[in-house]
Amino acid sequence: QGQLMESGGGLVQPGGSLRLSCAASGFIFSSSTGAWYRQAPGKERERVAAITPAGVTNYAESVKGRFTISMNRADNTMYLQMNSLEAEDTAVYLCSAVGFGVWGQGTQVTVSS
């Protein structure tokens, strides 16, 4: 079935940036729609961004203009560039290969001064 592993989370100040990585093994990631989700305590899981095999992207309204999703076929890795981070972006971020039903374990992003 393959697996996904997120990395790149951490602690950042408001207004800062992080780049999250989601490395796939055992399958071709770009053959599926890829998506980033986030979940914070007491809140529902939210789909942050998605990218189709054709490269079409979409974003949650709350992150439009600040986050960019991309897929690198050479290293079989999906990325989420996160700019102008806000406290409300604090969450565990998870990646998914939607068509394969494969999920990563998550990486913590904390935005705090």
Image: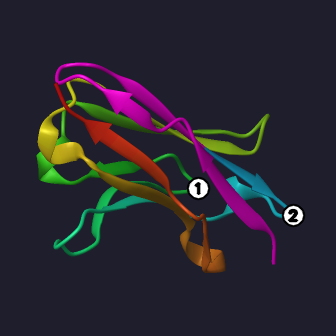
In the picture, the quarter occupied by the N terminus is bottom right
Direction from residue 48 to residue 60 in the image, left or right: left
On the question of residue 25 being in view, the answer is yes
**Residue 52 in the image, given as x and y percentages of width and height:** 50, 57
Q: Which residues are magenta?
A: 1-21
Residue density around tag 2, few if under 14, some if 14–19, many if 20 or more, within 10 Å: few
Residue density around tag 1, few if under 14, some if 14–19, many if 20 or more, within 10 Å: few
The amino acid at mark 2 is Gly
Find numbered disc 2 in the image and state the secondary structure of the residue it sits on: loop
Direction from residue 32 to residue 25 in the image, left or right: right
85 within the magenta span: no
21 or 70, nearer to the observer: 21
**Disc marking residue 26:** 2
In the picture, the quarter occupied by the C terminus is top left
Please report the residue visible at 47 percent of the width from the left and 60 percent of the height from the top. Answer: 94
Find numbered disc 1 in the image and state the secondary structure of the residue it sits on: loop
Please report the residue visible at 16 percent of the width from the left and 73 percent of the height from the top. Answer: 42
The amino acid at mark 1 is Pro
Q: Which residue is mark 1?
A: 53
In the rendered image, the vertical position of residue 110 relative to residue 56, given as above or below: above
